[in-house]
Image (cartoon, rainbow, N blue to C red):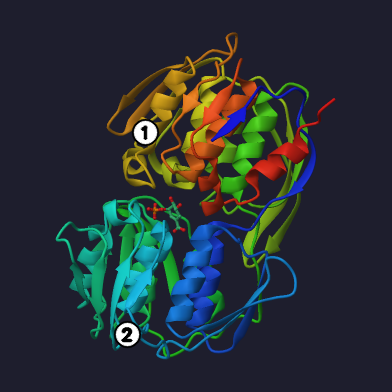
Amino acid sequence: MKTLTKAAAALTGSLDVPGDKSISHRAVMLSALGTGTTRVHNFLQGADCISTIECFRALGVHIEAGRKRGEIAVTGRGLRGLLPSSDPQELYTGNSGTTTRILCGILSPQPFTTILSGDESINRRPMRRVIEPLSLMGADITSLRHSGCAPLRISGAPLHGITWRSPVASAQVKSALLCAGLYADSPTTIIEPALSRDHTERMLSSMGASVETKREADGFHITIAPADRLKAEAEITVPGDISSAAYFIVAALLVPGSELLLRGAGINPTRSGILTALRAMGGDITQLNERESGGEPVCDLLIRHSPLHGCDIGGDMIPTLIDEIPILAVAAACAEGTTVIRDAAELRVKETDRITAVAEALQAMGCRVHAEADKMVIEGRADRPLRGAAISCRNDHRIAMSFAVAALTAEGETVLDNEHCVAISYPDFFKDLESLIQHR
Ligand code: S3P
């Protein structure tokens, strides 16, 4: 339990944004399949990425911690060198959807059987979205409880290239199929309705794989050719996670007098929808010192307190800010006027049902929210602050961090029931937040 109160003063100063969760996962997974050793810098030491490390260690990959925090060295076993995990032949993916789904693609062509399982939340999340296309490629995957969820038994089988039209824009599904496609007997194409985060494509290309993305009338076509080997990158510096930066961006926009510099934030266009949305709401956000890191665009973000107004978002923009919708909803509750967030049904199948979680928490804080299957309508009141409340984080890191920020603007005390879940993606979140609040 953690009790938070209104920020006594502005948020000022600067912060190095911790490593990107999606890119940290991929740095381990793809380096593990490469030939050579990769030094990864600014690796995110969150629980989800540690789950990925542990799974790949169990598959025989040598992963060593470096001398500096956030430094690891991964010695790849090549595309065909993974080993079956020993007793009890089960890989545990914890709370991590990215680990679970991408591993389905990597394990499908391996010459052994693996049982993949995670925590209670993972074992409730939909896996048919990867089982179905991988099975069409020839994979042998069984949902052991016949629920379409983990635990999954994956028995290696030869794979064929397919063309798969994914009903959802999901980078986890796309990445699972791209990894499986490396082992197929012909090219594999995934058609996405909107372009989801493209970190896998970028990293695979720089490791020598042939991956092509084309925009067609019916969506984005991403094609991968089979490969014999992936050349490990010598060094990868993981950019800062825009999803983690988002909490401080919103906090600084909302708390009067704030001015923050967030260094090294990733601004890949498939991830930076939160900046577009907050600017459309009137947020003063400046990009400084634009550069590249780990094959990804990054910059420093200068954020100044700004009065916000409501906005309307949906369609192709949703995948570019899918993980930021809880914190965007907090911004909307403190903005003047109504914000509508549509086409967001995917939020129902995240770590928790984030539409219900956000709507109930904002309502508890006195905001009027109307929730539908794929939509939230938030009636923002800039003239009346939120009021502190007891918030159920539902063991979801993004709900906990979003409502820690809401608490900074609210009258009275806010109590989070389990703040420890922030460790999934941002173990130092509260320490970093505290360091930016200038107590007088
Ligand atoms: C992720 C993809 C997204 C995102 C998740 C991380 C990834 O999920 O919500 O936090 O690293 O590929 P979906 O693929 O389900 O959209």
Answer left or right for 374 relative to 1. left
Residue on which disc 1 sits: 355
Mark 1 residue element: helix
Looking at the image, is mark 1 or mark 2 earlier in the sequence?
Answer: 2
Q: From the image, which quarter does the C terminus lie in?
A: top right
Answer left or right for 124 relative to 250. left
The one of 240 and 163 positioned closer to us in this rendering:
240
Among the 4 quarters of the image, the one containing residue 127? bottom left
State the residue at coordinates (49%, 18%).
365
State the residue at coordinates (42%, 53%).
195
Answer left or right for 389 relative to 154. right
Question: What amino acid type should be assigned to the residue bearing mark 1?
Answer: Ile
Q: What is the C-alpha distance between the residues marked 1 and 2? A: 38 Å
How many marks can you see? 2
State the residue at coordinates (62%, 28%).
4
Among the 4 quarters of the image, the one containing residue 262? top right
Question: What amino acid type should be assigned to the residue bearing mark 2?
Answer: Gln
Q: Farthest residue in the right direction?
A: 440
Mark 1 residue crowding within 10 angstroms, few (<14) / some (14–19) / many (20+): many
- Residue 296 in percent (x, y) is at 62, 62
Residue on which disc 2 sits: 110
Where ligand 1 lies, by quadrant?
Answer: bottom left
Q: In the rendering, which numbered label is found on residue 241? A: none
Q: Is residue 301 above or below residue 251?
A: below
Q: Are marks 1 and 2 in contact (CB under 8 Å)?
A: no
- Residue 80 in percent (x, y) is at 40, 90
Q: Is residue 15 above or below residue 143?
A: above
- Residue 303 in percent (x, y) is at 73, 35
